[in-house]
Amino acid sequence: MTISGSSPLRIVGVHGVGYFNPGAAAEGNSEAQSALWTLHLAAGLAMPSDSIDLDFAYYAHLLATGAVTQGASEDQLGDPLARELLAQWLQALEAPRPVTQGSLTLPLRHAASWVAKRYSLDGRLTRLFIRVFFREVAAYLRAGDDEARAAARDLVASRIAEHRPRVVVAHSLGTVVAYEALHSRPDLDVELLLTMGSPLALPHAVFDRLAPRPDGTPTPLGSRPSSVARWVNIADPGDPVAIPPGLANAFNGIALDLTTPVSEAFGFHRAGNYLAAAATSATLGPYIGA
């Protein structure tokens, strides 16, 4: 796709897990990732990088204290909440009961080996991903009024308020933070929320912990933030984080819920592959230069 436009598309990007870099200041991390996300988006759109004005909402440092539990080995999740979330994720993946129960007490490799076998992944990389993912998700979802959660949510809302983007692009855990941030600020005016590889609908672990809490009978549903005009979701069918499939089944107001291959192997959850995907380019295309 080749698109030309007279004015850069203003975007705020909201990252997922694994972005914490203790060796650099938060602003430096934000600038570096902004440049990288811009390159991925520009590559997918087949357009110059200067056609995109992307502000990166870097919040990983706010979760760093809670994300790593002191004394935990490389083969365990020391945080009880992280172990609980892992068990709920495995249940959603329909793992055998011994694997689901074992995730609470046995070494991390017990759960990782089952996930790796099911999705044909590298066992070591799967174990590393699970350890990082659930530590950071637990750090964010610990409690509705937790200081780290409020700080991350407020930072994202502030970057949106300051940058005034037409589009918010969020990936993985970032979709949860962006969803809550946008709900907390109905005064914000965002034309498009694009979520990618989202765990928002993950029962018990994420969905039932959201603020605002999903409601309704007989089936509780989340909703598009009132500050967002249009919501599009993209998920790779093999992405074990974007479960259960069909985000629109759990949330009102999603205009388009796309299930489409993003990449092979474990690349199907990487932000760069989602950003450069054809579905992402097609979604952003109408906003370029308009």
Image (cartoon, helix red, strand yellow):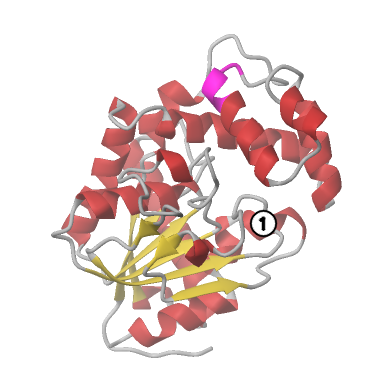
Nearest to the observer: residue 70 or residue 115: 115
- The amino acid marked with disc number 1 is Asp
**Residue at horizontal 47 percent and vertical 76 percent from the top:** 256
Query: Picture quarter containing residue 283?
Result: bottom left
Name the residue at the front extreme.
218
**Residue at horizontal 36 percent and vertical 69 percent from the top:** 253
Going by the image, does 230 lie left or right of 189? right
Residue 143: percent from the left, percent from the top? 36, 28
Going by the image, does 190 lie left or right of 4? left
Q: Is residue 27 above or below residue 74?
A: below
Going by the image, does 28 lie left or right of 77? left
Query: Picture quarter containing residue 222?
Result: bottom left
Nearest to the observer: residue 98 or residue 164: 98
**Residue at horizontal 61 percent and vertical 53 percent from the top:** 243
Residue 205 located within the stretch drawn in magenta: no
Give the magenta part as a residue range.
78-82
Q: Is residue 43 visible?
A: no
Residue 148: percent from the left, percent from the top? 33, 29
Residue 135: percent from the left, percent from the top? 54, 29
> Main SS of the magenta segment?
helix
**Quarter of the picture holding the C terminus:** bottom left
Residue beneath disc 1: 239
Q: What element carries label 1?
A: loop
